[in-house]
Amino acid sequence: MLEQYLPFVGLIIFGNIENLVLSSQGVVAGVNPIKLGIASILCVAMWLVIGTFGTQLLIDYVSFIEFIGGLAILILGAQAMITSIRGE
């Protein structure tokens, strides 16, 4: 069963790291932690459902999906780090 998810392992790991970076950025910005926690849990649950069913449908496009996902993670991570360094 897990064999079908192996091509996405890198994206899953870095996506979770990105979620942590964005959450910490929200905390530093002074966002209400309860609202942030609820929004984060909803996004993770939604991502789980999309990932579970999407993997079965789009397994043929794994290379393209990993590239786009990795690029998005890189851009969001860079944005979070630059904002953090500037102290905004």
Image: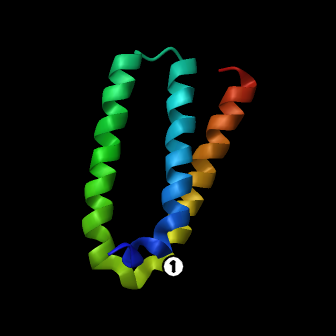
* Residue 81 vertical position relative to residue 18 in the rendered view, above or below: above
Residue matched to label 1 = 63
Is 66 displayed left or right of 74 in the figure? left
Image coordinates for residue 80, horizontal then vertical, percent: 62, 36
Q: Could you tell me which residue is drawn at 62 percent across and 44 percent down?
A: 77
Image coordinates for residue 43, horizontal then vertical, percent: 33, 42
Q: Residue furthest front?
A: 1
The answer to whether residue 65 is visible is no
Q: Could you tell me which residue is drawn at 39 percent across and 85 percent down?
A: 60
The answer to whether residue 77 is visible is yes
Residue type (three-letter) at the residue carrying disc 1: Ser
Disc count in the image?
A: 1
Of 33 and 68, the residue lying toward us:
33
Q: Quadrant of the N terminus?
A: bottom left
* Residue 20 vertical position relative to residue 13 in the rendered view, above or below: above
Q: Quadrant of the C terminus?
A: top right
Image coordinates for residue 48, horizontal then vertical, percent: 31, 54
